[in-house]
């Protein structure tokens, strides 16, 4: 029925249904808009007009009763002055006994259509006010209107000076305005009485309308005065009950205390609210014009005219605008003479501008509308200010005053009765914009300005709830959980600026050239009026104010250049909100009674009524109790707030917001490595949260998640403080510093709670162990919270992060205990056995590693689990090392305990490799584990080789185990992959081959019997020696090791020579040994290079120790090896000379003679060099290199 497109254009406002007699549009009403959107062509000039009925309380339209000629309108009809739904308020308003002056009529509409205010609509007003403005250039009558700006919207209300000044003598409300008016405008002001003719015309029109709706003439009972009063009072009651804003905001005290307050209450009294678009101006207009319909005329307006008086321009414009606003296509005029009906005439709306004596241009009306709007838009710039547009009767000058500024010059700035309705409207518009979930952030600047102006208008002591709520919404505008997008504004607005439109006061439009703002000749008017239109004729000039007609964009949102600035702004609003709440609790008895059933429209309100699963609070209480935090009952407010009261709800939201802001501040400080500051902020966040827990009667899972996040961050901070102990003084200073704002917020928190619930987590300790354990405790607490409800499954990412951190901190603590154990071990005397303290530390360390491994495995983090297994392996090796010191060093043997722990270490390393699976998962960790595993095997083998457990095992068994361990170490030692560790791997592998070769060499010397085994050992020794040499030759920093291996090979050759009987065999072996000697030249060249570099360094005090401490060259070692080398070379050369001399007698060849000659020369030079005790190390090496060159060229055994 009523679901036509007008009704669908916008749903009825909240609370609309509660108003007496409101209904959806009827079928008849929907016809009214059948011409919606059509452009009406009037008088040849095209004027675009479109009207959409947003709300109507009128009944279905009926045809008017056409009165017979000679009907006497002076006689009252039977139904006269009885309430009629068909006429609505029109029947009584025409008589003038209704409340004519309604300074708040536009506010009633604005409250009902809050979506339109501040954004889409340019003007909200009564249609009578619109008509009065558009008739200014044609009319001599006075104009007096209040103008208010809300965002982009202007609210226009009639300001009946006569009526208000009458009231001021009784109430004193408008005294200041009366004084100003008398001083500047009309010094001899007195009330002007309306003529008898005026009342006569009113009465006749009223009777005419009642006749027109009462065609059948049926008599209707006249209600008694008492009934009328009762019905009107019940209407008012319904109105107040149905208000859609929170109860304490319904009626401002300045209005409600007044006996005639209901006459200007914030009600939408219009029969119709119409969205009227006139050219490019969008207006929300209230109209009470009766519309008749039926038959051939679906919609007509009815007018009564005195036949003796022609229609003038003013009347014509009046009729035309009424029909345009209500989208009525035709006008019916009934002419009378002295109250006797003469005739009826039908006129189409578009013909009205061309009527005789009433000719006007629609184009001019359009220009007037645009000019007036531009004038007001560009001068009424301050939101929350009451402007007064005034034109004196018979004057051509229109002036605009800022009444708020004038009022502030008086003693009480709250004397302006508009203050409260404007503040409420600003608040409601901001609320409405905030509620839109898909609200674009570009509107945040507008919302912020609305709220700042709302707060600025209100008296803190009288309206704490609105101020607290507005401050909370201001804090909500700043997104804390994501980086601020600064797309919404190009130029930053000063955060303390209370002006809505930062540009407008600075740039005056170019209309100065046209003289439209030129000052009046009277200097007394000059300094008070905001702007003046010198002549009403200017309003008819097309595009006179075109340059400023365009509505300015919404004001800018402050650009916060960093997170700290954003959070500080949020906290400043939170603090103001908390102050309002706290001040209202102090004086609760002075506050108007709040309706606990009326919710404050806040963002989290829906959540707080929803509640989590049953038992959540109990679980939380148990957890808090375990943490030593919950010292009181479920709900405990020290200030005496009543659960469910607006103060309780608001304080909860503000406290939660402060905790979030402090958390973000802490996170930001953490990223800047300001750990002391980060701990201070997270302490404040947790103190806020603790207070929230004390006040909250229904813990939300969302809030529990916040707590888990706070504790996680707190754990991070404590860990970082532990790792940055060297900067402790600076961190402590940052931790103890506090701003005045933080102190005040903390003071507000202390009104409700001791805030000690999380003190254990936020103390700045100087002890490393306690810092690490507090960090671990924080993560454990965060994890425990996630076990409640289904938080773990709802927030898998956070859960994984918490477990990762738990694994990490347990690793840190495990390493801490492990290092302590290692330190104790290094301090302990070698002969002493393992202390209990060491064992305790091992247990603690092992327990931490085990738990950490479990944490990582539970979230399938193979890499980190492998690292912890690797660390456990290291712990096992430390345990093994601790058991090696028992007994005398000379009698020392590799103990079973050592073997046990080393094997355990191997098991953990192998587990780590299994955890990783393949090298591809994490090459660096894979290589690290392989290296540690290789090291463990190598250490085991080395210890078994060096401290053979001969008392427990046979030599062969030990050799077998050593060989196996060495080969396993080689298996996990990657010499081929190019990496930073490659030289280490090559050195390790070379050392392993060297040790194995030495072992087989030793076996060969000590073994008797089994020739097959001896042969096998000889082959293996030779193989490993050659491999060791190859690897050592790849390294540039191991010349001594290379020399040692080569000397051992020579010794091996000498040993073989002892078992040879034939000279040929001996010569062959000798030749091989000398060949090895020649090849040592590479090692000597490396040693020589390092010695030269050492000598070349400046011989200062600083560089000498640096050279000595160089690990690359051990001078003593070099001298020792050099001596051995010289002796072995001289021995080999001597043997060679002997053998060659003996064979020369039997068989002679030139080659052998040459070799013998060369060897003799080299031998004699070598002996001389050895005999020269004064030669330096470098000189000795140079001689050797020279001799080896000679040997390479022509020496040897002669059996090449």
Image (cartoon, helix red, strand yellow):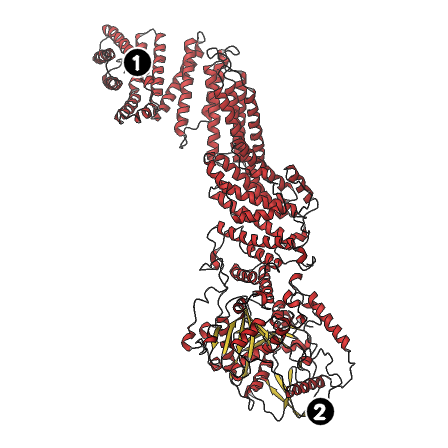
Marks 1 and 2 close (CB-CB < 8 Å): no
Does 9 appear above or below 883? below
The residue labelled by disc 1 is: 1123
Q: Is residue 956 left or right of residue 252?
A: left
Q: Residue at x 69, y 66 (%)?
A: 240
The residue lying toward the viewer, choosing from 221 and 360, is: 221
Q: Is residue 758 left or right of residue 540?
A: right
Q: Residue at x 52, y 35 (%)?
A: 863
Judging from the image, what secondary structure is the residue with disc 1 in?
Answer: helix
Does 593 appear above or below 1036? below
Q: Is residue 796 visible?
A: no
Q: Nearer the viewer, mark 1 or mark 2?
A: 2
The residue labelled by disc 2 is: 72
Q: Is residue 773 visible?
A: yes
Judging from the image, what secondary structure is the residue with disc 2 in?
Answer: loop
Residue 553: image location, x then y, percent: 49, 65
Count the marks.
Answer: 2
Q: Earlier in the sequence, mark 1 or mark 2?
A: 2
10 Å neighbourhood of mark 1: few (<14), some, or many (≥20)?
few
Q: Quadrant of residue 424?
A: bottom right
Q: Is residue 1055 left or right of residue 315?
A: left
What is the spatial separation of the Cα atoms under label 1 and label 2, in whole angstroms? 150 Å
Which mark is drawn over residue 470? none
Q: Quadrant of residue 265?
A: bottom right
The residue lying toward the viewer, choosing from 618 and 1001, is: 618
């Amino acid at each position: 029925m009523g679901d036509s497109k007008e009704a669908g254009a916008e749903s009825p406002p909240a609370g609309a249904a509660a108003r007496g007699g409101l209904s959806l549009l009827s079928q008849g009403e929907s016809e009214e808009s059948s011409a919606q959107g059509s452009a009406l062509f009037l008088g040849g000039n095209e004027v675009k007009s479109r009207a959409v009925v947003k709300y109507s309380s009128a009944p279905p339209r009926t045809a008017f009763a056409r009165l017979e000629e000679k009907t006497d309108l002076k006689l009252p009809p039977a139904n006269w002055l009885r309430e009629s739904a068909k006429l609505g308020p029109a029947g009584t308003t025409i008589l003038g006994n209704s409340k004519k002056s309604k300074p708040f009529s536009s506010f009633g509409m604005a409250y009902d259509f809050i979506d339109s205010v501040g954004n889409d609509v340019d003007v909200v007003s009564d249609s009578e006010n619109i008509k009065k403005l558009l008739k200014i250039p044609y009319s001599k009558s006075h104009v007096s209107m209040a103008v208010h700006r809300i965002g982009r919207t202007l609210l226009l209300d009639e300001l009946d000076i006569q009526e208000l000044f009458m009231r001021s003598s009784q109430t004193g409300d408008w005294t200041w305005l009366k004084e100003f008016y008398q001083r500047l405008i009309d010094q001899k002001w007195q009330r002007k009485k309306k003529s008898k003719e005026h009342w006569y015309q009113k009465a006749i029109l009223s009777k005419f309308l009642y006749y027109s709706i009462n065609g059948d003439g049926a008599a209707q009972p006249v209600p008694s005065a008492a009934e009328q009063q009762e019905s009107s009072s019940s209407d008012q009651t319904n109105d107040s009950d149905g208000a859609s804003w929170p109860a304490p905001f319904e009626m401002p005290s300045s209005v409600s205390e007044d006996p005639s307050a209901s006459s200007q209450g914030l009600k939408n009294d219009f029969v119709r609210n119409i969205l009227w678009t006139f050219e490019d101006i969008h207006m929300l207009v209230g109209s009470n014009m009766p519309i008749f319909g039926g038959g051939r005329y679906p919609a007509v307006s009815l007018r009564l005219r005195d036949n003796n008086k022609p229609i003038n321009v003013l009347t014509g414009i009046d009729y035309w605008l009424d029909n345009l606003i209500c989208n009525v296509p035709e006008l019916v005029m009934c002419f009378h003479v002295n109250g006797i009906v003469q005739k009826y005439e039908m006129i189409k709306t578009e013909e009205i501008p061309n009527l005789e004596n009433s000719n006007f241009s629609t184009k001019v009306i359009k220009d007037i509308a645009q000019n007036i709007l531009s004038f007001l838009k560009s001068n009424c710039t301050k939101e929350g200010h009451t402007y007064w547009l005034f034109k004196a009767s018979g004057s051509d000058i229109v002036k605009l005053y800022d009444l708020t500024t004038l009022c502030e010059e008086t003693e009480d700035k709250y004397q302006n009765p508009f203050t409260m309705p404007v503040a409420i409207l600003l608040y409601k518009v901001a609320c409405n914009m905030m509620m839109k979930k898909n609200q674009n952030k570009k509107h945040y600047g507008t919302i912020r300005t609305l709220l700042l102006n709302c707060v600025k208008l209100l008296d803190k002591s009288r309206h704490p709830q609105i101020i607290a709520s507005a401050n909370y919404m201001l804090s909500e505008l700043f997104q804390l959980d994501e980086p601020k997008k600064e797309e919404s504004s190009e130029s930053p607005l000063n955060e303390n600026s209370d002006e809505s439109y930062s540009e407008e006061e600075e740039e005056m439009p170019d209309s100065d050239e046209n003289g439209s703002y030129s000052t009046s000749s009277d200097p007394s008017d000059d300094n008070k009026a905001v702007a003046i239109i010198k002549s009403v004729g200017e309003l008819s000039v097309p595009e006179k104010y075109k340059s400023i007609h365009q509505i300015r964009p919404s004001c800018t949102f402050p650009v916060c250049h960093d997170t700290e600035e954003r959070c500080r702004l949020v906290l400043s609003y939170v603090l103001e909100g908390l102050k309002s709440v706290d001040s209202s609790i102090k004086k609760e008895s002075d506050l108007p009674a709040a309706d606990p059933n009326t919710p404050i429209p806040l963002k989290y309100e829906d959540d707080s009524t929803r509640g989590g699963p049953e038992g959540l609070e109990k679980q939380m209480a148990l957890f808090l109790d375990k943490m030593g935090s919950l010292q009181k009952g479920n709900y405990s407010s020290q200030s005496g707030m009543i659960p469910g009261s607006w103060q309780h709800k608001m304080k909860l939201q503000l406290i939660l917001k402060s905790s979030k802001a402090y958390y973000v501040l802490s996170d930001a400080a953490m990223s800047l490595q300001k750990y002391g500051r980060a701990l201070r902020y997270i302490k404040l966040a947790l103190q806020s949260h603790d207070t929230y827990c004390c006040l909250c009667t229904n813990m939300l899972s969302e809030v529990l998640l916040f707590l888990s996040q706070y504790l996680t961050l707190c754990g991070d901070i404590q860990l970082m403080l532990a790792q940055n102990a060297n900067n402790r003084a600076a961190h402590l200073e940052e931790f103890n510093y506090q701003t005045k704002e933080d102190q005040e917020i903390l003071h507000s928190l202390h009104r409700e709670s001791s805030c000690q619930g999380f003190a254990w987590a936020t103390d700045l300790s100087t002890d490393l162990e306690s810092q690490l354990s507090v960090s671990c405790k924080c993560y454990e607490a965060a994890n425990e919270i996630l076990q409640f409800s289904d938080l773990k499954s709802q927030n898998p990412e956070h859960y994984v992060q918490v477990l990762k951190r738990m694994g990490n901190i347990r690793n840190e603590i495990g390493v801490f205990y492990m290092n302590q154990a290692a330190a104790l071990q290094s301090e302990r005397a070698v002969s002493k056995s393992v202390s209990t303290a060491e064992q305790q530390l091992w247990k603690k360390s092992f327990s931490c590693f085990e738990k950490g491994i479990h944490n990582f495995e539970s979230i399938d983090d193979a890499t980190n689990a492998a690292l912890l297994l690797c660390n456990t392996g290291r712990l096992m090796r430390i345990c093994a090392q601790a058991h090696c010191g028992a007994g005398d060093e000379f009698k020392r043997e590799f103990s079973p305990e050592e073997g046990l722990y080393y094997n355990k270490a191997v098991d953990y390393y192998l587990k780590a490799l299994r955890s990783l699976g393949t090298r591809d998962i994490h090459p660096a960790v894979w290589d690290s584990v392989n290296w540690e595993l290789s090291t463990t095997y190598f250490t085991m083998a080395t210890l078994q080789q060096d401290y053979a457990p001969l008392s427990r095992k046979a030599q062969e068994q030990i050799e077998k185990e050593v060989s196996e361990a060495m080969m396993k170490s080689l298996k996990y030692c990657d010499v081929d992959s190019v990496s930073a560790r490659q030289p280490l791997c090559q050195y390790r592998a070379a050392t392993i081959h060297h040790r194995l070769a030495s072992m087989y060499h030793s076996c060969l010397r000590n073994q008797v019997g089994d020739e097959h085994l001896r042969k096998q050992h000889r082959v293996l020794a030779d193989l490993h020696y050659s491999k060791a040499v190859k690897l050592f030759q790849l390294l540039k920093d191991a010349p001594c090791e290379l020399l040692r291996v080569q000397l051992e090979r020579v010794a091996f050759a000498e040993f073989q020579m002892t078992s040879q009987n034939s000279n040929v065999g001996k010569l062959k072996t000798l030749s091989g040994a000398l060949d090895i000697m020649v090849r040592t030249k590479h090692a000597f060249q490396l040693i020589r290079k390092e010695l030269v570099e050492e000598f070349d360094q400046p011989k200062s005090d600083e560089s000498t120790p640096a050279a000595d401490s160089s690990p690359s060259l051990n001078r003593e070692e070099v001298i020792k090896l050099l001596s051995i080398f010289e002796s072995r070379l001289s021995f080999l050369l001597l043997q060679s000379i002997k053998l060659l001399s003996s064979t020369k007698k039997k068989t002679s060849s030139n080659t052998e003679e040459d070799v013998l000659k060369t060897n003799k020369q080299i031998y004699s030079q070598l002996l001389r060099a050895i005999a020269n005790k004064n030669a330096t190390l470098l000189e000795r090496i140079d001689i050797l290199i020279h001799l080896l060159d000679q040997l390479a060229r022509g020496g040897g055994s002669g059996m090449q």
